[in-house]
Each structure stands twice: as C-alpha cells, then as structure tokens.
Amino acid sequence: MKPRKLLALTLLICCALALQGCTDDEPEMELVFGELFRDDFDSVVLGEHWLIGPELQHRQDNKWSLTANPGFLTITAQEAEIYEANNNPVNFFLYAVPYQNFEAVTRILFQPESDFEQAGLAIYQDMDNYARLSRVHAYGRHAVEPALETAGSYSDWNRDIANTAEIYLKLTKIDGQLSYYYSFDGIKWQEVEHHPRVNWEQVYVVLYAISPVSGREVDAMFDYIEVRELKWEPVKSAL
Ligand SMILES: [Ca+2]
C-alpha cells in the first residue's frame, strides 16, 4: 500500500474509533410510558379536568350529556367549525396536557351522513393552531381526516374508509412531531404517512363533534379518552 493511502486509511480508522467513543458516552434512549390520564365517562358528573368551550360563549350545556348514553360522553354536533378563519366552535372538550411527549386515544361511536359532519380528537394550542383527526363524511364519501392548521392555514390528508359508526383515533406528539393513527378494533392501527412538526408548548387534547355545513344535530358518543405520557429513558440492558 502506498504511504498516502496508508495515511488516509489510518485517519479513517482513527475517526471511526473516535466516533465509537462518542456514542459510548451517549446511552441509547427509548420512549417508555409514564403517567396516565384516563376518563371513561362513567360518572354522571363531569371531571374538573375538563374545560368546555374553549371560551364561555362556546359552551351549550343542553347539547352534551353524560347520562343520555351511560358510560359515554355524548356531544350533539352543532353548526360549528374552527377551519381557518371560521372560528365558531361549540362544546369543545379540552384537557390541558401536563406532558411534553404523549399519546392520546379515544373510541367514538358516530354516524355521519352529510358532508363535513365529523367527530374527532385534536391536539390543540388555539383555534388557528391545532392537529385534528376526525371520522368524517367529506366530498360524498366516508373518510378519516388527519389535518393540521398552523397560523390559520389548514391542510388535510383525507383517506376513504368503508362506512362505519365505530372508530378508534390516536394522536401522538413526540419532540414536536405529530403522528396520526386510526383503527376499527383498537388493536390493529393504520398510521398516516404525514408527520408534521410543530413548536407548540402548552397544548390541550380536545374531543369535539361538529356539522359545519349540514347543521344536523347528530350525536357523537365518546367511550373514553386516554392521554399517556411518553418519556425518553436510557435503554435498560437485558441481563
Ligand atoms: Ca381556525
């Protein structure tokens, strides 16, 4: 081997060894479950952890119930929206998330029939900055709608599905990156390919049901909500 090549090879090996040394100092990390917030809506009294609105004028107490369908939070969809500048929500149920990284899961019984009737789950900073995932009727079809609104600009990645009145929805926020999942049985999850990044600090998890075009008052039944903290921890080496 020529001296120059030998020198290059030696440098390469030294660099590799140095990098190896660096990675040895940084333990491998993994996401683990931390604290859990869960509401099964089994009580006839709404938990104090809920804010209905978001503002007082957005609350209509005769359009939601914990007793109409025992064990469920029933929200009767109203002609409401937070799409771009159309900010007129009704009975959004907000839970202030105390975790930096988390996943939120809910099960919804809801049968939309006309365009834009929807019930869903959101990670929400304010009416112009949120990610929402809904079971929706859109453009004449049954669908799930993963969506993101930032600074009042809305994007969605609708997926057609077979008509169903039962769906599980999951959103995660990990190091500012959002992921959307849906399932028909709560076991096998479909992951949406879009993973937008956001820089929201304090967020809420939101349950909502709206019928912004039809105005049809249709009930959405929320079986439970689960918000689980996710924490980075060093990988525990197997003994
Ligand atoms: Ca908006």
Image (tube, rainbow, N blue to C red):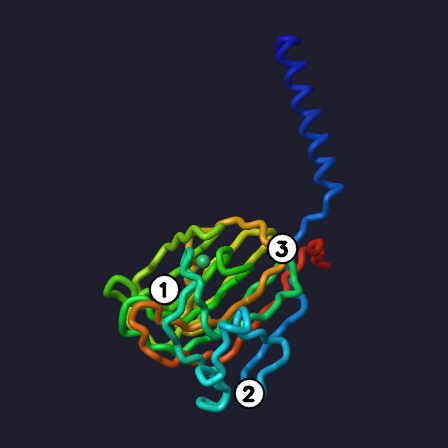
- Residue placed most toward the observer, 135 or 4: 135
Amino acid carrying label 1: it is Val
The crowding category of the residue bearing disc 1, from other C-alpha atoms within 10 Å (few below 14, some 14 to 19, many at least 20), is: many
Residue placed at 67% from the left, 25% from the top?
A: 13
The crowding category of the residue bearing disc 2, from other C-alpha atoms within 10 Å (few below 14, some 14 to 19, many at least 20), is: some
Instruction: Report how far apart the C-alphas of labels 2 and 3 lie in the structure.
Output: 31 Å
Instruction: Report how far apart the C-alphas of labels 3 and 1 lie in the structure.
Output: 26 Å
Queried on whether the Cβ of the residue with tag 1 lies below 8 angstroms from ligand 1, the answer reads: no
Could you tell me which secondary element the residue under label 1 belongs to? strand
Residue placed at 72% from the left, 30% from the top?
A: 18
Residue placed at 45% from the left, 89% from the top?
A: 69
Queried on whether the Cβ of the residue with tag 2 lies below 8 angstroms from ligand 1, the answer reads: no
Q: What residue does disc 3 label?
A: 201
Queried on whether the Cβ of the residue with tag 3 lies below 8 angstroms from ligand 1, the answer reads: no
**Mark on residue 42?**
2
Q: Is residue 166 left or right of residue 42?
A: left
Amino acid carrying label 2: it is Asp
Q: Is residue 45 above or below residue 191?
A: below
Quarter containing ligand 1?
bottom left
- Confirm or deny contact between disc 3 and disc 1 (CB under 8 A): no
Q: In this view, does 168 lie to the left or right of 33?
A: left
Q: What residue does disc 1 label?
A: 144
**Mark on residue 10?**
none
Q: In which quarter of the image is the N terminus?
A: top right
- Confirm or deny contact between disc 2 and disc 3 (CB under 8 A): no
Comparing labels 3 and 1, the label whose residue is closer to the camera = 3
Q: Which of marks 2 and 3 is nearer the N terminus?
A: 2
